[in-house]
Image: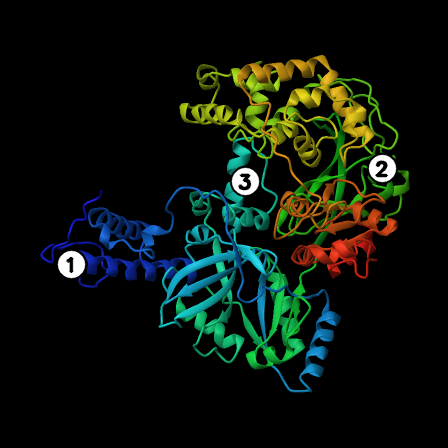
Amino acid sequence: MMTMTTPSAELTYTGLASGVPVARHPFARARQLHVQLRFHAQRYYNLDAPVISDGQYDTLLQELRNLEATYPGCRSADSPTQRVAGDPAEGFRQVAHPNPMISLANAFDREGLEAWHRRVTDLLDGQPFRMVAELKIDGLAVRLTYRNGRFAQGATRGNGQTGEDVSRNLRTVRSIPLTLSAHPPADLEVRGEVYLPLDSFRKMNEERERLGEPLYANPRNTGAGTIRQLDPQVTASRNMQMWAYSLNDAGDAPMPASQWAALQNLGAYGFRVNPLNRTCETVDEVCAFYDDMLQRRHDWNYEADGVVVKVDSLSQQNSLGVAGREPRWAIAYKFPAERSTTRLLDIIINVGRTGSLNPQAILEPVVVSGATVQHASLHNEEDIHRKDIRIGDVVVIERAGDVIPHIIGPVEVPGRENLPVFRMPALCPVCQTAVVKDEGDAMHRCPNSACPAQFLESLKHFVSRGAMDIDGLGEQWCRILIDQSLVSDVSHLYRLTAEQLTALDRMGDRLATRILNNIEASKQRPLVRILFALGIFHVGAEVAELLAGRYSSIDEIASAGIAELTEIDGVGPKIAESIVNYFATRRNQETIAGLRAAGVKLWQELAPVDTSALPWKGLTFVITGTLSGMTRREAEGKVKALGAAASSSVSRKTNVLVAGATPGTKLTTADRLGVRVVDEEGLLALLADPAALATNPDEPTTSNGSAETQAALELGE
């Protein structure tokens, strides 16, 4: 039992007080430090105008830490020292939003904006209305709740009705005040966009590149994943920030009369409000603001993908209301995806872990969407021929937020018809084995499982986060382990010793210990992760889950025949044959034996699951493209929880295709086959009312999702 020290009024505490007399009593000094630290944090994080140095701020913070350690009664939940506290959580609690977090309709040109303005004018019976134009930050929308001026809860948007309680992580975001200023209402709901600053994103990727680890795709997804980290220490280390954009509820207190007044109130309470926000009287003024922001979009330390235009008057907003899941009083005027032209210098071939030969474009460096682009994916030979891309072409490059851009097609210039048509090589560029291409397979493959390039990719896959999650072993270290003949089979990882690792150049004791600890921890990964990690051809995360749902051990799967495996819904003859061939191969048998000898858990307790009563039993979903509010695997988990199967390919048996950003050819296939297509918002609507889909799963597609999804379909992306 801890004995609390009672502070004496006779004690005097000294510290940097910025000209304010230093309080003598510990409790009073603690509150004084709270005020000072909040003031300086707001100057630094919200106003970008600090008045003391980082070292002086740290001195104040350390004084408060020392004070709270000596007198625990001085510590409170809103103390600046409590930004990060406690152990990682086991998961996030679901919380209902008192007011739904609805999504915005989109406009992609002036005509779309003018059409929205006309609709609003008609609905308001010709009443004039002012607008507020705000940058649309490309981040993660959150809802913040305050009680009596103190931070009480923070939640993600989720499906708009229900989100995840991420309060612990949001406490670490220093631009989110824990205690409000200027006498706020007793109950307050604020919404904002949390984002990862671009300089922080670049530093993270520079460090991952140095360690040989895969680079994060883009700041938006990385930031969203950061807020959903189970360990708030990780969130705190990434310098997340937030712009507040909405005051949604003030409890019993009167709400401000307008959006602009609400933004001013938010700033007075201590929230970070974007100084670029502007009021506009006409569509011309909105378009001028949009054009200005479009020209300056690379000047900021955050990503913005458009301008949000809102009716300013809250009474007019209430009169306009909501249509479906979108407010009539607001619209997102999106920035266009950025394109540029450059010359295609070469097409090189990378060999993947399954032997696939993956063509990659080498480009003359060009700046697209603020980044210098030198490489682009080309998918396969069929895609190259369909677009008629040739080495030496001037090509159109598009990049819309993703780090890896894609080639739209060539620019027609005189003489390009004389450029040679690209052909895949007849021999593997790494091991010189004759390349094969099976009928119906879009990829050319090297059939040599001992190909060095394949093993490097297999090892990288085995240690990756979605597989065995051996943190610290990025591509660079995987390559070194292979080059130093320490690992020639994935099971050899479990033979590594501290002496072997520390003998490697630039491998210190700390990193070696971290890697060995993570290798040891990986022995207890669930069976589904091991099945995925093995890299069995055609066995991705979805099929691994199907197998783990039927069998209790690797041995049971290894002894299953093709007929037995194809009884599993979602496992066809080609997949079954690949599984049987894998376990019949001597090299793979040796790998399994090595894992077993190392103590890797190759079995599980298999609990019977009754899915017969689930509403989406018998339905098949395909999820493609990039989703903004969740990962693709998380989306698949949500549909599986309702009984549906999640497939990786579109066929006539597919009931629903969920198309995120840049959906690819699956969208075209779904349209050709008449498969129902929804975008991310449509998926959230289905998840909110699963019974509707269960009642009529083959309902014809009345809309191909959002305008972005429809545009992609029209382009054949």
**Which tag is nearer the camera, tag 1 or tag 2?**
1
Q: Which residue is mark 1?
A: 25
**In-image side of 652 versus 606 (left or right):** right
In the displayed structure, 495 sits above or below 23; it is above
Q: Which residue is mark 3?
A: 205
Q: Earlier in the sequence, mark 1 or mark 2?
A: 1
> Regarding mark 3 in the picture, which secondary structure is present there?
helix
- Measured Cα–Cα span from mark 2 to mark 3: 32 Å
In the displayed structure, 256 sits above or below 414; it is below
Instruction: Say which amino acid is labelled 3.
Output: Asn
Q: Residue at x 65, y 13 (%)?
A: 590
Instruction: Say which amino acid is labelled 2.
Output: Glu
Residues packed near mark 2 inside 10 Å, few (<14), some (14 to 19) or many (20 plus) = few
Q: Earlier in the sequence, mark 2 or mark 3?
A: 3
> Regarding mark 1 in the picture, which secondary structure is present there?
loop
Q: Position of residue 594 (x, y in %)?
A: 59, 14
- Measured Cα–Cα span from mark 1 to mark 3: 47 Å
Q: Position of residue 474 (x, y in %)?
A: 56, 29
Q: Residue at x 81, y 42 (%)?
A: 393
Residues packed near mark 1 inside 10 Å, few (<14), some (14 to 19) or many (20 plus) = some
**Which tag is nearer the camera, tag 1 or tag 3?**
1
In the displayed structure, 579 sits above or below 612; it is above
Nearer-the-camera pick, 281 or 175: 175
Q: Position of residue 665 (x, y in %)?
A: 80, 45
- Quadrant where the N terminus sits is top left
Instruction: Say which amino acid is labelled 1.
Output: His
Q: Which residue is mark 2?
A: 382
Q: Earlier in the sequence, mark 1 or mark 3?
A: 1
**In-image side of 89 versus 380 (left or right):** left
